Image: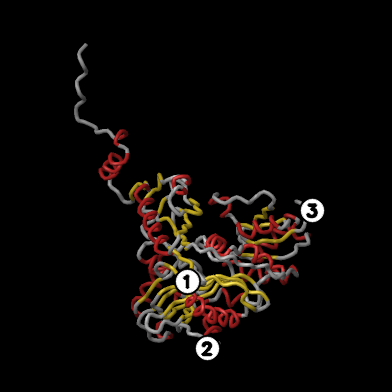
Amino acid sequence: MPQDQPSALIVGTDPYAMRACLRNGITPYVVHGPHLADWGYLKLPDGAVGIFAEDPTSIESVLLALRRTGAAEREFRFLQTSDEEALVTVAALARVLDLPTAVAADIAPNFRDKWLQKRAVAAAGLDVGASQVIEDIHHLDPSALADFDKAVLKPIAGAGTRNTSVVRGLSELIDTCAEYRRRGVPQRTFVLEEFTPGEEWMADGVVFDGELRFLSVGTYAEPCLTAVDANRVLQLERFDPTEDADAFALARPVVTEALRALGLRRGVFHMELFRRPDTGGLVFGECAARTGGGLISEAVAFKFGVDLGEAAIRCAEGIEPAIEPAVRPESVSTLFLANRPGVLVGYPSLEQIRALPGVEHVRLDLPYGFRTGDTVQDTTQGVGQVMLSGRTREEVRSRREFLTRWFDERLVVVPAHATYPELRSWQRANWPETASDFRTYAEPERQR
């Protein structure tokens, strides 16, 4: 292990944090779990040191791994994570190891427990939907719940809309809890949140010394849960601080007060908000003390020239990040590339996608042979992700629609649940030269 330069302890394989460390002459010691080898699409960069922990969300697992590798004896400059599920673990670990980190142990639960979070924000006087806790969905007590018409059922400390459902009334809630139990959903404690209609917005930014130092605001083409329920993937757009000044003016005070209520003194954040269709006001949805997914880091860097990974490690160390936004005039959008149910066997190359108008960044995540189920499970599911730019928002949307159609037309998936004759027909349609018919009698040989 390198001994001649500063080092930092990073829990989780955040490529942006690792890159920022290496750019600043800091060796990242990266605590990772089995997924790094199981998935295989992400490699630790040269200069990073991997530390395998069976469960990076367990303080016991991480401490044992540090002891086994000798890393526990190092003098790390700071401890950082962008792993949603490891946030509380890292906050506690920072106390054990006496290391600086962005989110303190007494604050971290506010960014994991959805009910605690909404209670804190509501107490600050912000508009927040009502919520109630279901301690164990395996043993639901309907009499303990207040009446509701339409609500969202989600794990109390979940992420990415996985195992999240819209339920209409008590009967649907009972059925959904029973279905989760039959499916073996690992979470038991859920929160039942009032359903909030309207546009879904996102706010991404940086806080230091309790002050909002940078803010980027955007919107989803359709709300996350709506997209997942309809088996569609996410599409995101960034607002422009000049053209969409009203959106920034509306979001900034809500974001500022929500972060203050949650106690975040320094760090990066990703917040979800809803805009009420009747009043136009913003309703607090939820907030994570990490960078957002879905190429949000790339979009913020492109539009504003701000590196959220750099800000994250600076805040973790307690050093004010140098943020000097340089806003580009282009509109920018990011999207997931949709898959179809079945076995993935072909898609366009990186070079072909990069050659399309407005493509600024592309990554393809799923390998050939990947089997996709009948339904979208969460907001991160897709063949890959693309960032697009354009002179106007209308041009970006047009390019996004074209890319979506273009990619789907070239996506090759062996259809799920197909019969033997259907598979033969599919093969003949896609590779006619490989298909053959088996006849009862062979053609007679040609006479010599």
Q: Where residue 437 sits in the image (x, y, percent)?
A: 24, 33
Dot 2 alpha-carbon crowd within 10 angstroms: few under 14, some 14 to 19, many 20 or more? few
Element marked by disc 2? loop
Q: Which mark is residue 125?
A: 2
- Looking at marks 3 and 2 on the same chain, the residue that comes earlier in the sequence is marked by 3
Q: Where residue 38 sits in the image (x, y, percent)?
A: 54, 51
At a point 42% along the width and 46% down the height, the residue shown is 348
The residue wearing badge 3 is 3
Q: Where residue 40 sits in the image (x, y, percent)?
A: 55, 49
In terms of depth relative to the viewer, which is nearer, 117 or 200? 200
Q: In the rendered image, which quarter is residue 253 located in?
A: bottom right
- Looking at marks 2 and 1 on the same chain, the residue that comes earlier in the sequence is marked by 2
Camera-near label (1 vs 3) is 1
Dot 1 alpha-carbon crowd within 10 angstroms: few under 14, some 14 to 19, many 20 or more? few
Asked if disc 1 and disc 3 are in contact, CB closer than 8 Å, the reply is no
Camera-near label (3 vs 2) is 2
In terms of depth relative to the viewer, which is nearer, 194 or 68? 194
Element marked by disc 1? loop
Please, which residue is most extreme toward the right here?
Answer: 4
In three-dimensional space, the C-alpha distance between marks 1 and 3, rounded to whole angstroms, equals 50 Å
Horizontal relation, residue 352 to residue 326: left or right: left
In three-dimensional space, the C-alpha distance between marks 2 and 1, rounded to whole angstroms, equals 29 Å
At a point 48% along the width and 76% down the height, the residue shown is 247
Horizontal relation, residue 448 to residue 317: left or right: left
In terms of depth relative to the viewer, which is nearer, 330 or 87? 330
Q: Amino acid at mark 3?
A: Gln
Q: Amino acid at mark 1?
A: Glu
Q: Where residue 185 sits in the image (x, y, percent)?
A: 46, 66
Q: Amino acid at mark 2?
A: Gly
At a point 44% along the width and 56% down the height, the residue shown is 382
- Looking at marks 1 and 3 on the same chain, the residue that comes earlier in the sequence is marked by 3
The residue wearing badge 1 is 243
